[in-house]
Amino acid sequence: METNKSVAFFENKKARRYFDKETETWFFPVVDIVEALTESINSTDYLKKLRKRGSELGFYIGTNCPLIEMLTNGKTLRNK
């Protein structure tokens, strides 16, 4: 694993993260943060329902969240 990809703890929950050296910016998967804040068992489903309820939120998340490769729990790389 590269040094700029790691796991942090947010609200006592694991949250994957990625540090972009060029822009000096940390990125976190939205589903990890939603899981920590809402204590939802299925954060992906929670986000889908939120997007359906509010069209502005669905548009915002879809356009302002860059896809970055993150390690999954199974240690495979995936865009999140």
Image (cartoon, rainbow, N blue to C red):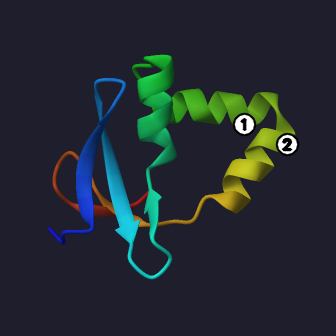
Element assignment for label 1: helix
In this rendering, is residue 61 above or below 50? below
Give the label on residue 56, or none: 2
Rendered image quadrant of residue 62 = bottom right
Q: Disc 1, disc 2: CB below 8 Å?
A: no
Mark 2 closeness class: few <14, some 14–19, many ≥20 residues within 10 Å: few
Give the label on residue 31, or none: none
- Residue type beneath disc 1: Arg
Rendered image quadrant of residue 9 = top left
The residue at which mark 1 appears reads as 51
Depth order, front residue of 48/1: 1
Q: Quadrant of the N terminus?
A: bottom left
Element assignment for label 2: helix
Depth order, front residue of 6/44: 6
- Residue type beneath disc 2: Glu
In this rendering, is residue 39 above or below 42? above
The residue at the far bottom in this view is 22
Which marked residue is nearer to the observer: mark 1 or mark 2? 2
Mark 1 closeness class: few <14, some 14–19, many ≥20 residues within 10 Å: some
